[in-house]
Image: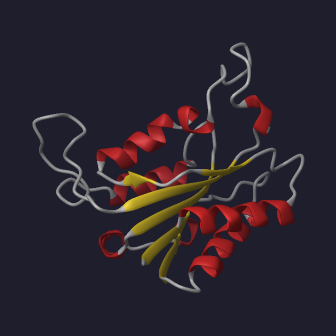
């Protein structure tokens, strides 16, 4: 398969991106053994036309990104705003949200959160009101659905600032990739 792996992290003094780079490198290493891989590290810069070509080339797009304020980091959102063009990613349709032009392609989110895992799927009075990770990031999923990309199960690690367990996180990621890709 042809797989595009994108690292959407943006540097902040309190979040320098080492974990996202580690997870990105792990995805490339594991999937690169039996697949064709292209990569983008958004904060290092990119050419819009080249990125569009990568999306057109890929069968699967994997987004490795932290969740900042319940969505993409600002610089990664700018990348998406520049790349996801009318007439390339989506077009006219009679029914809103059904004009996606990337039919037959799939996507996967690999996410890092500072939120502890037990805040999801918890009680109705918890911070996320008993919602799952995928329910919390519904807007991120709708962006891909708008372009007709099909979802692969989300990979998500939690409490990454206070309790980072890199060996556990990378093993969980490898297992997720083996199971879903």
Q: Quadrant of the N terminus?
A: bottom left
User: In this figure, which colouring scheme has been used for the structure?
Assistant: secondary structure
- The structure residue drawn at horizontal position 35% and vertical position 57%, both measured from the top left corner, is 82
Of residue 30 and residue 55, the one placed in the foreground of this image is 30
> Residue 64, position in %: x, y?
59, 60
The picture quadrant where one finds residue 95 is top left
Please indicate whether residue 92 sits to the left or right of residue 13 in the image.
left
Of residue 88 and residue 10, the one placed in the foreground of this image is 88
| Image height of 96 relative to 80, above or below | above
| Image height of 42 relative to 123, above or below | below
- The structure residue drawn at horizontal position 68% and vertical position 14%, both measured from the top left corner, is 124
Of residue 160 and residue 157, the one placed in the foreground of this image is 157
> Residue 65, position in %: x, y?
60, 56
- The structure residue drawn at horizontal position 73% and vertical position 18%, both measured from the top left corner, is 123
Please indicate whether residue 17 sits to the left or right of residue 168 in the image.
left
Please indicate whether residue 160 sits to the left or right of residue 124 in the image.
right
> Residue 154, position in %: x, y?
57, 50
- The structure residue drawn at horizontal position 72% and vertical position 13%, both measured from the top left corner, is 125
The picture quadrant where one finds residue 51 is bottom left
Question: Which residue of the protein is positioned furthest toward the top in this rendering?
Answer: 125
> Residue 19, position in %: x, y?
76, 62
Question: Which residue of the protein is positioned furthest toward the front in this rendering?
Answer: 179
């Amino acid at each position: 398969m042809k797989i595009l792996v994108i690292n959407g992290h943006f540097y902040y003094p309190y979040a320098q991106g080492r974990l996202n780079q580690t997870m990105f490198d792990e995805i490339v290493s594991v999937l690169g053994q039996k697949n064709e891989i292209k990569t983008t590290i958004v904060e290092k810069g990119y050419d819009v036309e080249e990125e569009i070509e990568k999306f057109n080339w890929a069968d699967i797009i994997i987004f490795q990104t932290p969740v900042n304020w319940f969505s993409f980091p600002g610089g990664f959102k700018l990348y998406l705003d520049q790349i996801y063009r009318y007439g390339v990613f989506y077009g006219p349709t009679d029914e809103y949200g059904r004009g996606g032009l990337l039919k037959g392609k799939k996507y996967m989110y690999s996410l890092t959160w500072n939120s502890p895992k037990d805040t999801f799927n918890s009680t109705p009075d918890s911070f996320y009101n008993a919602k799952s990770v995928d329910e919390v990031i519904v807007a991120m999923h709708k962006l891909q659905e708008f372009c007709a990309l099909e979802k692969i199960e989300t990979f998500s690690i939690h409490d990454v600032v206070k309790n980072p367990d890199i060996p556990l996180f990378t093993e969980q990621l490898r297992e997720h990739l083996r199971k879903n890709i």
